[in-house]
Image (cartoon, rainbow, N blue to C red):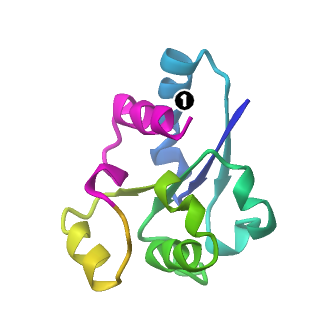
Amino acid sequence: MMKVLIIENETQTVQVAFNAANTIFFEGKIQYSYATKSQDVQWSQINQFSCIFVDISLAMRSDLDGIGIITKIQNEYPALLSRIAIITGHHKISEAIKENGLKIEPTQIILKPLKYTELANFIKSCE
């Protein structure tokens, strides 16, 4: 079973799209785990996930924002970097990626509102 981590503080706003992708494209075989803030991420188990979706702007109570989480992964778990997708409503995200020296490709950015077909395509690329 494929495991996908979604780091998003407003899970209810993305759940429908992820569930639709799972039902329509994967016959319900994807196991989703949600983390609403960086402290909820089980870093010792991060390698278990086939894909990781990171919202850039997390809640104020999160120690790291999405950029901080991706920076940590880039520095400590570089093999996972190609399996990360940014989910965001910020249309100028490419500038923030460059400013922070992140090695994220444009195909790893999924703009909100999320489309289940885009989520499914990224998940398929992680298989």
Please say whether residue 115 is visible from this viewpoint: yes
In the rendered view of the protein, which quadrant contains the N terminus?
top right
Q: Residue at x 56, y 69 (%)?
A: 78
Residue 16, image x, y percentages:
49, 33
Nearer to the camera, 45 or 40: 45
Q: Is residue 66 left or right of residue 34?
A: left
Q: Helix, strand or loop at disc 1?
A: helix
Residue 98, image x, y percentages:
26, 78
- Amino acid carrying label 1: it is Asn
Q: Residue at x 53, y 39 (%)?
A: 15
Q: Considering only vertical position in the picture, is 45 above or below 114?
A: below
Q: In which quarter of the view is residue 17 placed?
A: top left
Residue 36, image x, y percentages:
62, 62
In the rendered view of the protein, which quadrant contains the C terminus?
top right
Q: Residue at x 60, y 15 (%)?
A: 27
Magenta residue span? 105-127
Specify whether residue 112 is painted magenta: yes
Q: Is residue 99 left or right of residue 35?
A: left
Please say whether residue 111 is visible from this viewpoint: no
Nearer to the camera, 43 or 7: 43
Q: In which quarter of the view is residue 69 placed?
A: bottom right
Q: Residue at x 35, y 82 (%)?
A: 101
Nearer to the camera, 83 or 16: 83
Residue 75, image x, y percentages:
56, 80
Q: Considering only vertical position in the picture, is 49 above or below 103?
A: above
User: Count of labels shown?
Assistant: 1
Residue closest to the far front: 79
Q: Which residue is mark 1?
A: 19
Residue closest to the far right: 44
Badge 1: few (under 14), some or many (20 or more) residues near its Cα, within 10 Å? some
Assign the magenta stretch its main secondary structure.
helix
